[in-house]
Amino acid sequence: MSTSQGDVEDLLRELAPQVLAALVRRYGQFHLCEDASQEALLAAALQWPAGGRPENPRGWLITVASRRLMDQVRSEQSRRTREELIAVATPQSELLGPPADAELPDSDDSLALLFGCCHPELSSPSQIALTLRAVGGLSTVQIAAAFGVPEATMAQRISRAKQTISGTGFDFSLPAGAERTERLRAALHVLYLIFNEGYTATAGDALTVPTLSQEAIRLTRWLHRLLPDDGEVTGLLALMLLTDARRPARTRPDGSLVPLAEQDRQEWDHTQIAEGIALISAALSRGEVGPYQLQAAIAAVHDEAKAMADTDWPQILGLYDLLERAAPNPFTALNRAVAVAMVHGPDAGLEVLATLATDKRMARHHRLLAARAHMRELAGDTDVAAADYLDAARRATSLPERRYLALQAGRLTR
């Protein structure tokens, strides 16, 4: 019985981290196991839609990937390298059928794989690329397209990341205690960055890259299934759902940006909003509150308002006060300044921005300039606001943001 292409793709994306984790646990050699698992996934993508999926898809993939790995060993030209690789490959008797552990629970292995991809010795771009490739199951072509870089550039980045992981001697066992907490924090940050890049691309012609946002949500859902009682995992999933719910209303048919105040809230995904609110409500009731939970709570207040005028800005400001104490960073301070302006007036917001402008990371950032322009416009200082909008447009790297900011400058100078 044949299986639809879409069903096969969904299944393979779910199984990809499980297969790679099983191979790495058995054989080590992350870079070789990753190549072998990708070949097995490709073979399944070609065979299963027409021939039907096997009774044990995970076992089939692990078996095929193991055979591919042995083929790599046999074809290795260097005797020394060949002997080293054979030493880590267990007896071929395991390769005659599905490995004995093909049906073992995968949660610890998969979690260890995610933690490995977020190894502290990897740069943030490498962590993101390797997570999307190894845990997300995206091809190098897909990842390169999502970030708007040449395939060769992304392939090199992923290759370097795999080499770094192999060089660290990381054995992909699940860490415990403080190390586990720290590695989970890093993994959540990587998923957060993937989502943000998808929701508002840092560069390029499109405001959003839905592939990245959807993949971040999918992976965070998966992580939430593995760690259902972790408040910050729940908070991050809620934040993504509550934020992504607005995506349909963020652009016009021509791709131009629609600011929050002008969005048609009927176009928001209210099913996602309901799910996000339920998740964050449950998380907040369980105990200690972390930064992702606070950000999700802020997003929920925005999403519950039927119109911009109905937004509970005092509550949002209170949540930003908590967030700034829990996890201070310049972008949190920038968002808090906007809330201050909405509660206490634009002059109060401008005072906060003046302090933030002394931070070298933010002084000439286009979002600080755009926020300052908006507050100056509200305060009636339109000439200076227009200059700020124009300066922000020059510094923006996203074409839709640049065009929007330039239009605001032009509107004030007519």
Image (cartoon, rainbow, N blue to C red):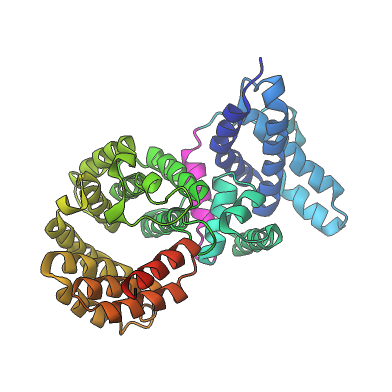
Q: Report if residue 406 is visible in the image.
A: yes
Q: Residue at x 49, y 69 (%)?
A: 397
In the figure, is residue 186 to the left or right of 116?
A: left
Work out whether residue 250 or residue 66 is closer to the camera in this orientation and state it.
250
Work out whether residue 81 or residue 37 is closer to the camera in this orientation and state it.
37
When asked about the image quadrant of residue 12, the answer is: top right
The majority secondary structure of the magenta stretch comes to helix
| Residue 61 x, y percent position in the rendering | 66, 33
| Residue 255 x, y percent position in the rendering | 47, 53
| Residue 351 x, y percent position in the rendering | 19, 80
In the figure, is residue 123 to the left or right of 144?
A: left
Work out whether residue 31 or residue 244 is closer to the camera in this orientation and state it.
244
When asked about the image quadrant of residue 97, the answer is: top right
In this rendering, the answer to whether 72 lies above or below 402 is above
Q: Report if residue 328 is visible in the image.
A: no
Q: Residue at x 54, y 62 (%)?
A: 204
In the image, farthest residue toward the front: 414
In the image, farthest residue toward the top: 1
In this rendering, the answer to whether 222 lies above or below 391 is above
| Residue 319 x, y percent position in the rendering | 18, 59
Q: Is residue 300 magenta?
A: no
Magenta segment range?
A: 105-122
